[in-house]
Image (cartoon, rainbow, N blue to C red):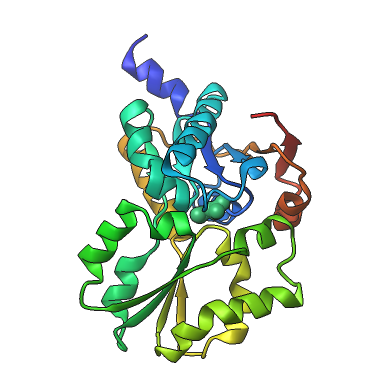
């Protein structure tokens, strides 16, 4: 097979995306908006969510399982749409497989560059905040800044179980955000792909001047750049085939993707 034939066929293959559950759909929405011709396959590993309290070895094993399924399904690139899996497993995945990987990490750099109060908040899972990759990034970009790190204990199950509008959610968020508000943060970094779905609630609690940032758009731009540099962009203008697979029930997935119901399919898959 010549390399041009390889690229000719490979660029029509789907973008593979995985997350510990439904949160990575926030990343899929950015990718689909930036690359509307691309076919996508999304794996929601909700059966094993949350990843945030698992050991690094466990997260690596789950990431390998998801990667192998996405490769079997014909992916041309893999987006790890989970901060916890990226910070604990992406180096391992890149060493093990030749397929390109895109990861998502908390956007601590732009927050540290833009803050005026020199106080930024970061809400993420235990697995992300305790990872060596996050520690390195934080030391590199935020060493002159006070970073208030808070583990969003219990927030992933809230999004997984479609309980975002429950009054208890607001109370829990208030507990997490209080120390940040007291410290006068002007940037809040959402370090988990589930958390963008909590932004309406978070906005009710934060002072208006606080800017909330997540990495979804940056991940989509990076996906496009890496596809371009590998000649893997799909150049055909057509209605894309966007498949979502979950290994648990699909209630939350359907709710989060209801605006896309005419463009996507959601099915159960054992993986
Ligand atoms: N969406 C995952 C992340 O970005 C959630 C992790 C978890 O399952 O705890 O970190």
How many marks overall? 0
Question: Which of the two residues, 200 or 31, is positioned nearer the viewer here?
Answer: 200
Q: Is residue 209 above or below residue 264?
A: below
Q: Which residue is at a point 62% across and 63% down the rendered structure image?
A: 154
Counting from the top left corner in percent of width and height, residue 268 is at 74, 34
Q: Residue at x 32, y 39 (%)?
A: 91
Confirm whether residue 209 shows in the render.
yes
Please state the horizontal and vertical placement of residue 138, each as a whole percent of the image: 28, 65
Q: Quadrant of residue 242?
A: top right
Q: Is residue 79 left or right of residue 134?
A: right
| Side of 171 where 112 appears, left or right | left
Image height of 243 relative to 29, above or below:
above
- Between 235 and 94, the one lying in front of the other is 94
**Quadrant placement of the C terminus:** top right
Which quarter of the image is occupied by the N terminus?
Answer: top left
Q: Is residue 174 above or below residue 127?
A: below
Percent across and percent down for residue 41 are 59, 36
Q: Is residue 235 visible?
A: no
Q: Position of residue 244 (x, y in %)?
A: 66, 40
Q: Give the farthest residue toward the top.
A: 1
Residue 178 in the figure: left or right of residue 248: left
- Up/down of 247 relative to 49, above or below: above
């Amino acid at each position: 097979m010549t390399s041009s034939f390889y690229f000719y066929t490979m660029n029509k293959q789907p973008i593979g995306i995985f997350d510990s559950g439904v949160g990575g759909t926030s990343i899929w929405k950015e990718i689909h908006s930036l690359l509307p011709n691309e076919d996508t396959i999304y794996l929601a590993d909700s059966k094993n969510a949350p990843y945030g309290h698992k050991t690094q070895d466990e997260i690596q094993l789950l990431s390998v399982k998801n990667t192998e399924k996405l490769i079997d399904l014909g992916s041309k690139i893999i987006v790890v749409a989970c901060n916890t899996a990226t910070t604990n497993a992406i180096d391992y995945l890149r060493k093990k497989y030749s397929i390109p990987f895109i990861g998502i990490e908390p956007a601590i750099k732009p927050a540290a560059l833009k803050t005026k109060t020199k106080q930024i908040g970061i809400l993420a899972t235990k697995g992300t905040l305790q990872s060596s990759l996050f520690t390195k990034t934080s030391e590199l970009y935020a060493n002159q800044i006070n970073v208030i790190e808070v583990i969003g204990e219990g927030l992933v199950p809230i999004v997984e179980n479609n309980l975002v509008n429950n009054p208890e959610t607001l109370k829990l968020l208030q507990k997490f955000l209080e120390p940040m508000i007291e410290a006068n943060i002007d940037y809040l970094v959402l370090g988990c792909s589930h958390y963008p779905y909590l932004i309406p609630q978070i906005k009710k609690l934060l002072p208006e001047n606080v800017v909330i940032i997540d990495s979804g758009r940056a991940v989509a731009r990076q996906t496009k750049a890496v596809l371009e540099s590998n000649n893997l962009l799909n150049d055909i203008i057509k209605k894309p085939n966007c498949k979502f697979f979950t290994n648990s029930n699909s209630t939350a997935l359907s709710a989060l993707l209801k605006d896309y119901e005419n463009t996507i399919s959601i099915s159960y898959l054992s993986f």
